[in-house]
Image: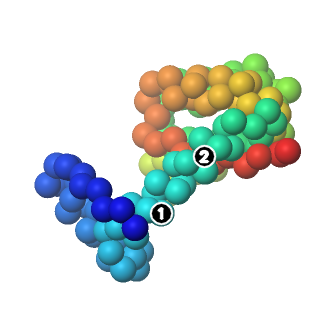
Amino acid sequence: MPIISLSIPRELLYKIDRYIRERGYFSRSEMFRDAIRNLIEEAEYMSRERISSTIMITYDKDNLSVSKTVSRLNHEYNDIIIESIHRHLGNEYCIDILIAEGDRERIADLLRKVRGIHGVYHIKHMFIPLE
């Protein structure tokens, strides 16, 4: 197997090493191979015409602007959003989970708009090919 080198900030290296210990990887190389495979897999999924996507959005429960924007996107993209779930996480946060199915470009457009929402703490997404 070819060997490559990588330069990263020391603080990030500490986080990577902690991640490796917590997840049970045997080495940094194993963790990086896994991460790279996931990135390539996602890119391959995005080359398909029809995909399914799960988009998770977390934000402060008192941020009504985010909640209203997600609701507006639900209506704007009701042709591809097949499920929408809103839940409270503890006393401080909300999570919205959008499940979309359809044209890759339409789903990518939805994800771009979600990424543009101000006040969001975290966005996580996953793609699955439908063809």
69 lies left or right of 11: right
Label 1 with label 2: CB-CB less than 8 Å: no
Percent from the top left, x then y, of residue 54?
A: 68, 46
The kind of residue tagged 2 is Glu
Percent from the top left, x then y, of residue 57?
A: 56, 41
Q: Helix or strand or loop: what does disc 2 sit on? A: helix
Q: CA distance from mark 1 to mark 2?
A: 12 Å
19 lies left or right of 56: left
Which residue is found at the position 44% from the left and 62% from the top?
33
Question: Which coloring applies here?
Answer: rainbow
Q: Which residue is at the front of the view, 3 or 129?
A: 3
The kind of residue tagged 1 is Asp
Q: Which residue is at the front of the view, 52 or 119?
A: 52
Q: Residue furthest left?
A: 10
114 lies left or right of 92: right
Badge 1 is on which residue?
34
Badge 2 is on which residue?
42
* Mark positioned earlier in the residue sequence (1 or 2): 1
Percent from the top left, x then y, of residue 114?
A: 57, 29
Q: Is residue 31 visible?
A: no
Percent from the top left, x then y, of residue 15?
A: 26, 61
Which residue is found at the position 51% from the left and 25% from the top?
117
Q: Residues within 10 Å of mark 1 (few under 14, many from 20)?
A: few
Q: Quadrant of residue 96?
A: top right
Which residue is found at the position 75% from the left and 19% from the top?
76
89 lies left or right of 31: right
Q: Quadrant of residue 71?
A: top right
Q: Is residue 78 visible?
A: yes
Q: Quadrant of the C terminus?
A: top right
